[in-house]
Amino acid sequence: MSKLMILMPTSPQRREQVKHCLAHQAPELKWLDWNDEPKIEQLQQVEQVLAWEPPKNIYAQLPALKWVQSYGAGVDSILAAGPLPENVQLTRVIDGGLNERMGQFALAQVLADRFELHDHFGSQQQSQWHRREGHWGNRIGIVGLGSIGQALAKDFNRFGFQVSGWSRTPKRIPGVESLQGEAGLNQLLEHSDYLINLLPLTLDTENFFDAKRFAAMSPHSCFINLGRGAQVVDDDLIHALENHTLRKAVLDVFRYEPLPDTHPFWSLASQSTRLILTPHIANISVPERIVALTLNNLQRLNNQQPLLGLVDPALGY
């Protein structure tokens, strides 16, 4: 009887990619697919789950469950499905390829803004020769210094930027100023030319970036959200941009995805390059690497070794 189940009901393309990779990397492994509607007796045998956006209250149907592996770096969708039993371990993706992709995306957005490439593209469409001075602020602020945040900090440091970061606990990163507490956060907001959000979504970080925090930022700064859409109060961000208390924003994540075509973000972005929208492309997981990590953790679980990417469900990270 299979003890591993693929639980990705809202992502048919990802699900098929995972199944293909499992068949290639572990042809001897037997697994279940939630979408094949397994029988009750099969669900009662499931001990491990590879999940993304699982259905509500699913864990009550899996009495033998020991471990849940998230398909991504975040676990908010896993925890939103219901409380995990105390003895169930939860892990997330810690993947060098993911860190590299996030770093490249963030750096690309900062450099595009420095050289005003989005505005130059508009001039090109109008056959206009318009030289711009660009934005040459050099101070990068990173909110959230987990594995991805630390990798980004090192990347920007190598490119000569002045990098500071904020986290709930102190971090030691060569060449990077580490800040904590409300005073440290306010310092980061006030002095960053580019503020990059990488916080995990928890009860404490939902609606984290609101009118108060946007007002604390420099009017010359650019806000880049690579964390979660629910961490931003949309109306407050729009107000900050329209009233020029914030120079620019780049959003790759949204409270509702796909972003509804009636959302006011679209209207504002169509009028100005001060709001850049991308469809959650900064941290697309590579199926081959996710499956390799899952199989590695599965072997560790069977050998009673510590799992990689272990998450405290109470904290959400």
Image (cartoon, rainbow, N blue to C red):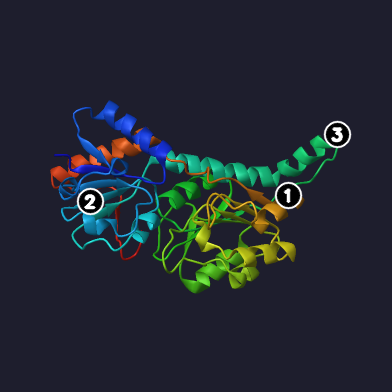
Can the viewer see residue 192 in this picture? Answer: yes
Which comes sooner in the sequence, label 1 or label 3? 3
How packed is label 2: few (under 14 Cα within 10 Å), some, or many (20 or more)? many
Q: Quick check: 214 above or below 228?
A: below
* In the image: residue 234, left or right of residue 302: right
The residue depicted at 19 percent of the width and 47 percent of the height is 46
How packed is label 1: few (under 14 Cα within 10 Å), some, or many (20 or more)? few
- The residue carrying mark 3 is 127
The x, y position of residue 204, in whole percent, is 43, 69
* In the image: residue 265, left or right of residue 74: right
How packed is label 3: few (under 14 Cα within 10 Å), some, or many (20 or more)? few
- The residue carrying mark 2 is 67
Which comes sooner in the sequence, label 3 or label 2? 2
| Element type where label 1 sits in the image | helix
- The residue carrying mark 1 is 270
Which comes sooner in the sequence, label 2 or label 1? 2
Picture quadrant of residue 82:
bottom left
Q: Amino acid at mark 2?
A: Trp
Q: Quick check: 192 above or below 41?
A: below
- Quarter the C terminus occupies: bottom left
The x, y position of residue 29, in whole percent, is 20, 33
Q: Quick check: 218 above or below 32?
A: below
* In the image: residue 236, left or right of residue 10: right
The CA span between labels 2 and 1 is 45 Å
- The total of numbered circles placed on residues is 3
| Element type where label 2 sits in the image | strand
